[in-house]
Image (cartoon, grey):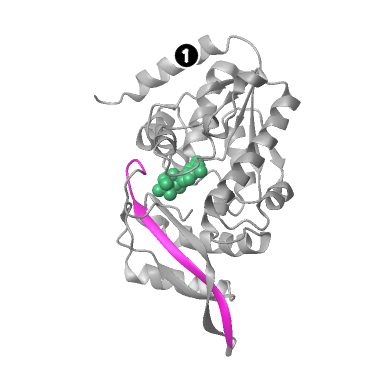
Amino acid sequence: MEFEARKFVQEKLKEIEEQAKEGKAVCATSGGVDSMACAVLAHKVLGDRLTVVFIDDGLMREGEPQRVLKEVQEQGIKAEIKETREEFFRALKGIEDPEEKRKAFRDTFYKVLGRIIKEKGADYLVQGTIAADIAETKKGIKTQHNVLEQIGVNPGDYGLKILEPLREIYKHQVREVARELGLPEEIHQRMPFPGPGLATRVIGEVTPERVGILRKATEIVEEEIESLKPFQAFAVLMKDRATGIVREKRAFGSIIVVRSVESKDALTASVTKVPHEVLEKIQERITTEIPSVTKVLFDITPKPPSTIEYI
Ligand code: XMP
C-alpha cells in the first residue's frame, strides 16, 4: 500500500491530541530527521506544553549542539541544550565491549533524561523511535538506545506516558513526513546519525581525545562525500594502530576507516561507488589535518554480512 504522508500526519495529530489532552511533554532531539519530525509533529498539538532538549553528551559532530538548537527554535519550538559531557565520558570510561558501551550510553542517557523530565514536571516523553529500531531490537541484533522495553523501564512506573508517533514507519517514510511538516530539505534529507553518536564509531575506549580525532575525521568525510548524497557516510576510529611516517619520523599512529553506504531502510545496505579521486582527497586531508593518523582505509562490506555501524 502506498504511504501517504499527509494522511499519516493527520492521523498522528489526532492520536497525540487524544493521548495528551493536558500536561507537559519533553522531547529529546539529536537533530536527526526522526526526532525533528517527531518534535514538530508533537509541537503542532502541544504548543508550549512541549520542551525540546538537546542532550550534549560530547559525542556529537562539530558544532552540532548549537546548530540543532537553532533549527528547533526556527520551528517556533521551546528548546534548550543540556550540557552533560563529563557524565557521559565518565560512564564510558574503560569500556571496550560494543554492547557494554551501548548499555553505558543508554543508561546515562535515560538517567539524564529522567532528571530533565523531573525538572520540567513532564507527564509525557515524546520519542522518535522508528520501525527499524524496533525490528533490530526484536531480532536481538543490537541494543537500540531508545527502545525502552529493552532497558526494563516501564515508563508507567514513573507516571510517565510515552508518545512514539513514528513507531510504525521507516526512514524513507519519516523523510516524507518531515517534508510534509515543512521541515527544510537540509533536515528531511539529512544522513542518519546514531543516537549514541560518535561512541558507535570509536572502537576501543571512548575518551574525549579519541572522540576529538574522530570528530575531525567525520567532518572531513562528510564534507568531501556530501555531493554524492550517500545514504550515510562517516569515519570510524580503529583500536589498532599502524606504523607510518610523521614529520620524517617513524610513528605508530591511528587508523581511520571511511565508510559510505546506500540504503532505503537501513535494514540492508550496499557500498557507495565513491570515485577514487574523492577517496584520495579524503586520505590527503585526514593525514594532513590529523597528523596522528597514519592509515586511512575504505570499507567495502555491504549489509549483510556487515552492519552499517561498527558496534
Ligand atoms: P546498523 O549498524 O545496525 O545501523 O546497520 C542501522 C541504522 O541505524 C543507525 N543506528 C542507530 N540509530 N540509535 C539510533 O538512533 C542507535 O543506537 C543506532 N545504532 C545504529 C545506523 O546509523 C544506521 O543508519
* Residue 140 seen from this side: yes
Looking at the rendering, in which quadrant would you find the N terminus? top left
Residue furthest bottom in the image: 248
For the residue pair 152 and 284, the one nearer the viewer reads as: 152
Please name the residue shown 30% across and 26% down the image.
3
For the residue pair 16 and 130, the one nearer the viewer reads as: 130
Residue that carries the numbered disc 1 in the rendered image? 15
Q: Does 204 lie within the magenta span?
A: no
Q: Position of residue 40 (x, y in %)?
A: 52, 27
Name which residue type carries label 1: Glu
Q: Vertically, is 233 above or below 123?
A: below
Q: Residues within 10 Å of mark 1 (few under 14, many from 20)?
A: some
Q: Does 259 lie within the magenta span?
A: yes
Q: Vertically, is 137 above or below 155?
A: below
For the residue pair 162 and 288, the one nearer the viewer reads as: 162
Question: Which residues fall within the magenta stretch?
Answer: 250-266
Residue furthest right in the image: 119
Ligand number 1: quarter of image = top left
